[in-house]
Amino acid sequence: MARMKFYCDAERCIECNGCVTACKNEHEVPWGVNRRRVVTIKDGQPGERSISVACMHCSDAPCQAVCPVDCFTTTKDGIVLHNKDTCIGCGYCFYACPFGAPQFPSDGAFSSRGKMDKCTFCAGGPEEADNSAEEFKKYGRNRIAEGKLPLCAEMCSTKALLAGDANVVSDIYRQRVVNRAASAMLGGAGLQQTGFQAEVTNVPPALEGKASDMPPTDAKPSAPPPAPAQ
Amino acid sequence: MDESVKNPGIDLWNAVRGREGTETGQVRSQVDSVDSTTLVNMNGQAWQQYRMDTLIPNAAIVLGLVLLAIVVFRLVRGKIPIRAGRSTHKIKRFSTFQRYVHWTTAILFVALSITGVVLLFGRYVVIPVFGAEIGGTLTWLFKSIHDYAGPAFAVALVVLVVTFIKGNLPNLSDLKWLAKGGGLFGGHASAGRYNAGEKGWYWTAAIVGAFVVVSGLVMDFPNFGQGRDTMTYYHWIHSISAVIVMAFAMGHIYMGTIAMEGAFEVMQTGYCDANWAKEHHDEWYAEMQQAGEIEEGSPLPRQVNAEASPHPNV
Amino acid sequence: MKLTKISGQASNPASATPAIKSVSRREFLQTSSLMAGGAVLATGLGTGMMRKADAADAAKLAAGETKEVRTICTHCSVGCGIIAEVQNGVWTGQEPAFDHPFNLGAHCAKGAAIREHGHGERRIKYPMKLVDGKWKKLSWEEAINEVGDKLLQIREQSGPDAVYWLGSAKHNNEQAYLYRKMASLWGTNNVDHQARICHSTTVAGVANTWGYGAMTNSYNDMHNSKAIFMIGANSAEAHPVALQHILKAKEENNAPLIVVDPRFTRTAAHASQFVRIRPGTDVPLIWGMLHHIFANGWEDKEFIRQRVYGMDEIKAEVAKWTPDEVERVTGVPEAEVKQAAQTMAQYRPGTVVWCMGGTQHTIGNNNTRAYCIFQLALGNMGVAGGGTNIFRGHDNVQGATDFGVLSDSLPGYYGLEEGGWKHWAKVWDVDFEWVKGRFEPGKYEKGKDKDGKEIDVAVMNTKGIPVSRWIDGVLEDKANVAQKDNVRAMIMWGHAPNSQTRGQEMKKAFEKLDMLVIVDPYPTVSAVMHDRKDGVYLLPAATQFETSGSVTASNRSIQWRDKVIEPLFESKPDHSIMYLLTKKLGFEKEMFKHIAVNGEEPLIEDVVREYNRGMWTIGYTGQSPERLKQHQQNWGIFDYTSLRANGGVCDGEFYGLPWPCWGTAEMKHPGTANLYDTSMTVAEGGLNFRANFGVERDGVNLLAEDSWSKGAEIQDGYPEFTADLLKKLGWWDDLTEAEKTAAEGKNWKNDLSGGIQRVAIKHGCAPFGNAKARAVVWTFPDPVPIHREPLYTSRHDLIEKYPTYEDRKSFWRLPTRYKSVQATDHSKDYPIILTSGRLVEYEGGGDETRSNPWLAELQQDMFVELNPRDANNAGLKEGDDVWVEGPEGGKIKVKALITERVAAGVAFTPFHFGGHFQGQDLRAKYPEGCDPYVLGESCNIAFTYGYDSVTAMQETKCSLCRITKA
Amino acid sequence: MQQEGHTTIAPEQQYRANVYRLLAALLRDVPAEPVLAYARQLADMSAGGDALATALVGLGLAARHTDPLAIDDEFHALFIGLGRGEIVPYGSWYLTGFLMEKPLGLLRQELAALGFERDPAVKEPEDHVAALCEVMAMLIETDVAFARQAQFFNQHLTSWQERFYQDLQQAPSAAFYQTVAQLGVSFIRFEQQYFSIQR
Ligand SMILES: Nc1nc2c(c(=O)[nH]1)N[C@H]1C(S)=C(S)[C@@H](COP(=O)(O)OP(=O)(O)OC[C@H]3O[C@@H](n4cnc5c(=O)[nH]c(N)nc54)[C@H](O)[C@@H]3O)O[C@H]1N2
Ligand SMILES: Nc1nc2c(c(=O)[nH]1)N[C@H]1C(S)=C(S)[C@@H](COP(=O)(O)OP(=O)(O)OC[C@H]3O[C@@H](n4cnc5c(=O)[nH]c(N)nc54)[C@H](O)[C@@H]3O)O[C@H]1N2
Ligand code: HEM
Ligand code: HEM
Ligand code: SF4
Ligand code: SF4
Ligand code: SF4
Ligand code: SF4
Ligand code: SF4
Ligand SMILES: [Mo]
């Protein structure tokens, strides 16, 4: 049986936020509620990477475990859905969730958060999928029922964000890792960063050894480049 | 293909999980909301374990045991009568203001306890019994009561603590009272205006209550950008102190209602039976006697008819 | 303004009403108070909005199923395909176009939020004008009449050049074409659009190097690249879907990705090598790389011999750029430069990508030529995987440039010479003399004829004022402006103002105008940044989703958009507005002579057919509306890498018939995917460099040597084709009789039959000849690209060696200062270099995107990026309000964002914000409900003087500032 | 303006329809003199005392005592503004927070099924409050089955119009239109009751 998963390939994610607005577009999630977000670490430094995160549809979902009204269900595809009619907006799922997925339409005084909202894997609500206006208003569109996959992943600008059956997702990713490993071995990788800093124009930062990461310099210039790794 | 080639995502995820000392550097997200820059919520699991594996079972055990103890106590000791029987004299023990304050606090407390307990255990009871939809609405109602009663209780508690401080400062005779287990063994334990048990309750309510209140307020007003770590930290304080205070409260409530003849009416009317005072607060009784505060009057009725109560809304 | 979150559930009032059980409906009504009102209520009022439908129409609608409409993203030049789901005229959904060859369904934040355009929430909904400081609604008729009368009055008093027609890269090709035509028939060259402040230096530099000023290959072609060199391009934010292609090459070809930028950008985060340069030092960096290449003999000598002119002069200049000097000027150490050079030499074919980091400088044209020369030296031109992949800007900036919405050219780069005018007069089927008569009769400028004699230049042949300088056209002393009068009316037709520098002066210019007309879906900052009380008109334009037409992506592919929804509210498509306005101005007959007008809407397809008859230079002639629509309907059959259809209805054709698509549509030329690629026949889309600069210079042959495109019957260089050449070659009789008549005395550019092109191609030849690319552009101020310090330089010590140009008295009709500005050293008072650029969520001036809540939520504050070191020196913390003040006094109040993205001594600001002015919030000035969700300071208030020496491109990548706590 | 397709309907049904027509006339554009004249007569109605009657009389009185020019200004401030007025009179906006959204699509489908269309001269979308009132009036006058009327009302009017009228009542510029809003609210409630009756 299919087990739906997301995987965000940080080597590809460019923090373009396409996935974030795709989700807004598809589900008309209100201002302030973001079922998906992109997080960048080491921002502005070598090694900077971004990851797009939403609900990861955990097996043994922590949100489900802590909910005082037990309003989560896991579908047979492994999608974790929650019921907005039952939800009391206590916020416990947000505390427990490893990924900060649960969102609340407000965070007003007297703990008035409104009904929790989170990524549905574009599978609508937990009730019978009917793609009704009511369902849409509460949970957004049900793409899964239409035989489609999450829009955020489908629209990802660099195909960094993968969604779907866990096996398929990991196959795609594995292939990429193999390609990259080949790249790394052939000498393309290894980011270096030096250059202009206003007050320090004349001090060349230590670079020894780095240049030799490159292939030897005496290669014939008009010789064909090394065959690309497949 | 070289086997040793590692997944290029590994460094990243190690950094994300805060392992291996990998620097995450400056972390940013354009989604600007609480904790949006936290990729993996490290404390979530700990909190989940605390709440589900520690808090809920232990709360159930503690509260259950207290209840059991009360029942056992009741069975063993039965109701504590006024041994000398009702006297014709009564003593003014609480002012009207004090009674108002007490009952306001008490009602809010009970509301908070019930609703709090529903939050804790409701999932195992309310939902199975009423179903998700009604159960959810019901729980939502309880939660809302809790959310609004909380701040009111915070105010009430402060007023209560101030109002009742007189007579609740510990003194030497409390030790004796305690040594005698409040009269359970070693014969009559004499006490002042409040005995050590009552004082204990007073101070528990004041101190542990303060923890409950402060932590509750932090959780109740999430609109100051508190992060998850803050919230779970205060939840942890709140829940533990709430269980403690509920456990004590059960004792207090038991003592104040069906445990002891003549007790409830004191808070109800403000007057206590002179004999009751003599038996339970002998030192205070003596003081009152000296001060000539013992009033003559008809014996107080055992049960005040609700209609006739001067404070029907109490 | 922040939107408040909408809270969970709306209460349902209906449920509050108890059902009445005891009475019947009839009783209920009869006992109700309605009866009391009976006498009055018995007589009715009519309806005004709704009516009973015709049975036929009703049946049509009742079906009500969801339609899928194909269109193209209107934000950037990548040209991503979009599938819009439309239900009963409402844009209800957006599906990924998985089979679209450019994006495979992918989108960045803007494309993924494009459906919001269908709501039109913050749009201008009716024509409006400012009366006494208040916005008043008008009817279209009133608006057109008032605007038209005023234009005619100004024309009467000050001549046609007193009206400035600022056009747009947002227009589709047909609208852009009509726009240029409209300005021409009004009688002015004061017409321009975003390309001026975008890639004008690219177009000039590149076209003058090898013929055409455009991206040579395509995004998809980068799949073939073995190395990718990106300089001054932050494509992860500006062309996000391009990264799909770049990362594919990086992963699958082992292609190193080198990013040269003053900032560590989101693109740099994915680089294999990041080179941080000092802003404004691109030429030294490139010369520094070439230094290593020449020193090691890594250049492609055979390629240079066959196909490049003037490389020796370049070598001489490059020789001056020793590693030490390169490091002194750029800040980049030798090893870094060498490594980059070596990588590019090693991995071929490699491609060079550049964008605004290179173009927006006083020496922008030098930069772009240096990049070209670099590729020529490595022999990377004309091959798949190589080329100069110049990522263009707006969705249709390529098209609008091609259609000459420029103050220096007619459509198709025919220039402003008499020949060009005559060609177009013929295509338009109007009398050339009549067109000439529409212009101001006097002469503004002197020029030189072929023999260098000074002659008067007719106004019609004089370059107009560029958009970068329109404010000077208004403000400059009349005596100094080379035209009859100052600019008195400004028409901003799809162009924001906060994208041009010198905001303080712009405010004055706005206030001095007699009339300001804004034709745009949004009010834009133009509506609010001045203190005018009247004389401002807002005319609601429909967006490109509310009309159909074609759009040219960066790679020259032309894509057809279908109409998604009807124009919202009272907005009208631009071409309809042009029709109404020209009708008012009295030349709609000439303007639409061969274009059917349906009511007030000119038929888009007829416009295509008209320009198909005239755009011979760059091959916009083979793309008939039918072919374009066929490509759109079948976009799934084109190869993801080559863009060529393999089988199917478009077999052998390249997606979108990338120009040049030679000859007539009947010729079925497949389009040219990669320019100058000699490995294919011209008929299949092959080419060689264009012969556009003569055949010989100082005795040196400018034509190609021993190089020709596959299958050419002339196996050497050859000049461009003319009727005479055909005759000489004995190919004249390949023309049909009709073609002969048309072609007599003509050349490949002005033979309206297309016969000359057809025959040349039949013999395997490129109609435009076969020449060398020229590394030395002897017609430019700096024939060999050299380094010159920016006007506001942080290194005043370098100006002695690398000074800027002399001031000019009249350049594009205006006095233009260089040296006099550079003379003052501002670097002590303004110690930080200020640069600017893009954020992925917003576009251009940002009015459109800041009005889209899905995007606006992600960038709520204007900010300045500061290095921690500068922040610490100034005592600033992240999130502090700071003043960024430029040396001309413009200052902006923004939030500090402290980050190592920028080097110490450099600050970066995005330029998409507007609606604040030097600390003042102008929200109240917007017409109610039209204010974008997010406002902020425009960085261009602080940006300063400085214009490219060839194209008058503004300097927006390198100025100075000081930053203090606010 | 047109009035067509009349079958003879019970007077009380005609009254209902005409309240819809009145609301539509007051909300679709600056009310013309005949509309105001019509409204003024309501002041003479013998008030029944319930909310609807009070509202009708209130409207009549307001119409009598307000300068038509002031009503013109008020209408502009409320509904036209420039980009938009103080009040957004569209269903889609109330239901989704956006203009031109899915509810409009559904509405159009339903209108087509019922055989109505927008006058081609009109640029406002069909989920405009006045357009819906006009449709209701036409449904009543053409004696469309109760269940169908109820369905349309419940789907496209009740879901948001009460909130709309409440907003209108509280809009900063509303004066005369407060009374219109009053009528709107009470009439919508009245209709809700009517449609809730089983027989
Ligand atoms: N999201 C979004 N996308 C867009 C647009 C938009 O507004 N928003 N606009 C479109 C348009 S019109 C255009 S033209 C393109 C522009 O696309 P880009 O040119 O890629 O975008 P920019 O951010 O303007 O500039 C690119 C980089 O130039 C660097 N730079 C600054 N000074 C120098 C310098 O002196 N030398 C070098 N080498 N680099 C320098 C900046 O740090 C910046 O990272 O984007 C298009 N795409
Ligand atoms: N400091 C600084 N300044 C810069 C730059 C920079 O990097 N730094 N970049 C420069 C560059 S490269 C560019 S291209 C410019 C861009 O700057 P602008 O072109 O001025 O900015 P946009 O907001 O993209 O302008 C497009 C306008 O067209 C409108 N529009 C959209 N669709 C249509 C339509 O169908 N019809 C009509 N009539 N209007 C429509 C939009 O609402 C918008 O107002 O900015 C330049 N300015
Ligand atoms: C003394 C009385 C109180 C008791 C016994 C009590 C008890 C509890 C309990 C048992 C929980 C549930 C914990 C869980 O499910 O894990 C809880 C939650 C909570 N309590 Fe209290 N509490 C008391 C007072 C207060 C006060 C004074 C406040 C606020 C001012 C407050 C605010 C909260 C909040 C915000 C929660 C989290 C659930 C929610 O969002 O409603 N409580 N409390
Ligand atoms: C339903 C619940 C409660 C009942 C039936 C109850 C009953 C009583 C009674 C009968 C007394 C009088 C005892 C005496 O005269 O010595 C009393 C005293 C008191 N009660 Fe309560 N009570 C309740 C809840 C509470 C709560 C929630 C608090 C505080 C949080 C509280 C705080 C006090 C205090 C401070 C006194 C004064 C004696 C002392 O200081 O111990 N009570 N209560
Ligand atoms: S909400 Fe969080 S805990 Fe629950 S399934 Fe999603 S990611 Fe897992
Ligand atoms: S917020 Fe809702 S879903 Fe989350 S734990 Fe509380 S009740 Fe459950
Ligand atoms: S799967 Fe659907 S709901 Fe979840 S983040 Fe993606 S688009 Fe949003
Ligand atoms: S759309 Fe893709 S590349 Fe862009 S931020 Fe999301 S996951 Fe990253
Ligand atoms: S803005 Fe550019 S990259 Fe983004 S979706 Fe549109 S065309 Fe594609
Ligand atoms: Mo641009």
Image (cartoon, rainbow, N blue to C red):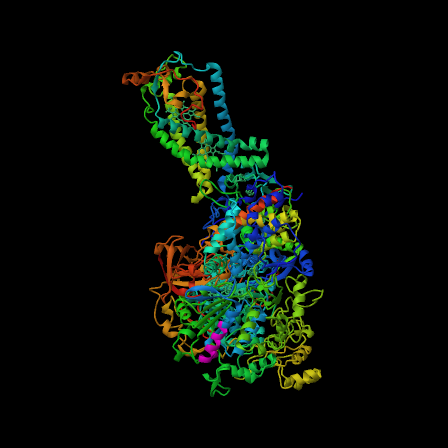
**Front residue of C304 and C505:** C505
Q: Is residue C530 above or below residue A147?
A: below
* Residue for point 52% across, 52% down: D42
B70 lies left or right of C176: left
The residue positioned farthest toward the left in the image shown: B291
Location of ligand 4 given as a quarter of the image: top left
Residue D171 location (% of width, % of height): 46, 52
* Quadrant containing the N terminus of chain C in the rendered view: bottom left
Q: In this view, does A95 lie above or below C324?
A: above
Badge count: 0
Tell me the quarter of the picture where residue B184 sits: top left
Tell me the quarter of the picture where residue C510 sits: bottom left
* Quadrant containing the C terminus of chain C in the rendered view: bottom left
Residue A76 visible to the viewer? yes
C444 lies left or right of D147: left
**Front residue of C83 and C902:** C83
The secondary structure that most of the magenta stretch takes on is helix
Query: Is C157 within the magenta?
Result: yes
Q: Give the range drawn in magenta.
A: C146-160
Residue C265 location (% of width, % of height): 48, 58
**Front residue of B82 and C761:** B82
Query: Is C210 within the magenta?
Result: no
Residue A13 location (% of width, % of height): 55, 54
**Front residue of C786 and A122:** A122
Q: In this view, does A91 lie above or below C443?
A: above
Residue A35 visible to the viewer? no
Residue D153 location (% of width, % of height): 60, 49
* Residue for point 40% across, 12% down: B83
